[in-house]
Image (cartoon, rainbow, N blue to C red):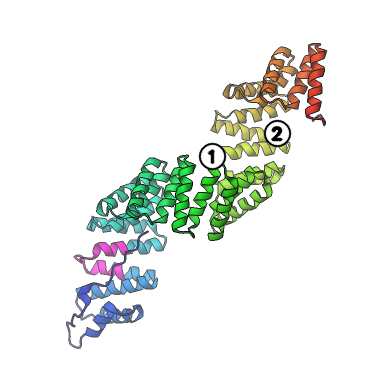
Amino acid sequence: MVFDTVPPPASAQGVGANHEGGHGGDRYQCNSSAPDRAIVACTKIIDDRREDADARAIALQNRGFYYQQKGDLDHSIDDYTMVLKLSNGHNARAKIHLNLGLLYFQKGDQATALYNYGEAVRLDPKLATAYINRASILISRNDAEHAIADLDRATLLNPKDSEIYISRGSVYAHAGDLDRAIADFNKSIALNPANAMAWCDRAFAYRRKGDARRAASDAAEAIRLDPNMAGAHLELGLSLQAAGDAKGAIAELDKAIQLNPSDPQAYKARGDIYLAAGDRDSAIADFGQAIVIDDKSTAAYTNRGVAYLNKSDWSRAIADFSAALALDPNQFAAYLNRGQAFGASHNRDRAIADFTQAIRMRPESGEAYRQRAFLRQAGADSPGAMDDYNQAIALNPKDAEALRGRGYVRLGRHETDPAIEDLTAAIALNPKDALAFRFRSLAYAAKKDTKRANMDGATARQLDPSGR
């Protein structure tokens, strides 16, 4: 948001009073004094009904400006609004609407701010600041198309303003148009190579494009220009994470959190690295902090649920996945993971319901079919399990667990040779799968092939002496 307040009009300086007694001193102070004294002087002129409309309009505009400087939004709005009523032909109307837009934005009234920015550009189509400020609201409303249109106009009016290219590049980047985003960041950097934000935002675009090396280089340059830019440390951390440098990523995310302890994204990103490394407790702590800062973070709830799932804490995992789904019921991962937690806690019906919903959302997910097949198999639903395993294997012929599962179902249906075929394929994909060897041992025994049955049984015991 660009702040461009309207200063007191020059016409107020040194203008004599138009009635006996005069306000010469008041006029001067109304135009050029410190805010408190200026407000008193302007008020005297405004309250004097002998003053003509233009003089009162100038005093109102000045007082509105001083109220704006003091942060008294309501009084400033009242004064600017009265100026518009008193003087339809006032030459500063466009900028007064601009100021009203800023004030209403500060009050959180985006609709009225948008109206005033619209009036500002209608009255003065060359007022670039109004386009930029309107674009910032449109961005917050995810209206990328109209935001870009406004920023296009702003770049035509001020082609050497590097900040406009950053704003437009950011819109392109978050909309997924990464090449255009990078082109805009390039223009911004060419105009002002010392602007750390342009380097940081280009790093974001390169990372989204999958170019972790360039992303890390740009983020490092942003840090060189501004060592205290938390967002640049965050971006470097995420880029190093994408490049597989977990240690370096955590170091940068530590700095990002130190500089900005209120950034949930930094905690969530560090939690992701801890989770991938198997440090579940540290991951849970970071995801928890991200949720404290932003309790609408579905990703933090989902990933903390995964950490609890990996700790076999089924109830907490279910609670987190349910919280994520309450915020966004379209989360495939939450249904898939909650299904596993329900299954592990022996709530088969709810687990199957979650896997079924996951399949509805992503019919191409072999894992969802496989997970549902396990539960159908455990519930003695052999036909349903076979259908799901068939679908999982059709989607991923190298799904060793699905092949093992289908082999076991076929074994139970006395389809011995097809069972051996599936179990042999599963073992080829995962030679350390004790269960697959155990099941194939049973299949060979059913064929009276004692030698192979004993060999597979011995391998199964060697891989898993506990016999689980």
Q: Is residue 251 magenta?
A: no
Q: Residue at x 42, y 41 (%)?
A: 176
Q: Would residue 23 be visible to someone looking at this image?
A: no
For residue 29, which quarter of the picture?
A: bottom left
Q: Quadrant of residue 67?
A: bottom left
Q: Position of residue 461 (x, y in %)?
A: 81, 26
Quadrant assignment for the N terminus: bottom left
Percent of width and height locating residue 143: 38, 47
Task: Kindly identify which residue carries mark 2.
Answer: 348
Q: Amino acid at mark 2?
A: Arg
Taking depth in this image into account, of 230 and 22 the one nearest to the observer is: 230
Q: Is residue 259 visible?
A: yes
Which image quadrant: the C terminus? top right
Q: Judge left or right: residue 189 versus residue 359.
A: left
- In primary-sequence order, the first of circles 1 and 2 is 1
Instruction: Name the residue type under label 1.
Output: Asn
Image vertical order of residue 94 relative to residue 364, above or below = below
Residue at the spot of label 1: 330
Q: Is residue 144 above or below residue 13?
A: above
> Range of the magenta residues?
79-99
Q: Is residue 98 magenta?
A: yes
Q: Nearer the viewer, residue 20 or 274?
A: 274
Image location (x, y in percent) of residue 289: 61, 55
- The quarter of the picture where residue 209 lies is top left
SS of the residue at dot 1?
loop
Q: CA distance from mark 1 to mark 2?
A: 22 Å
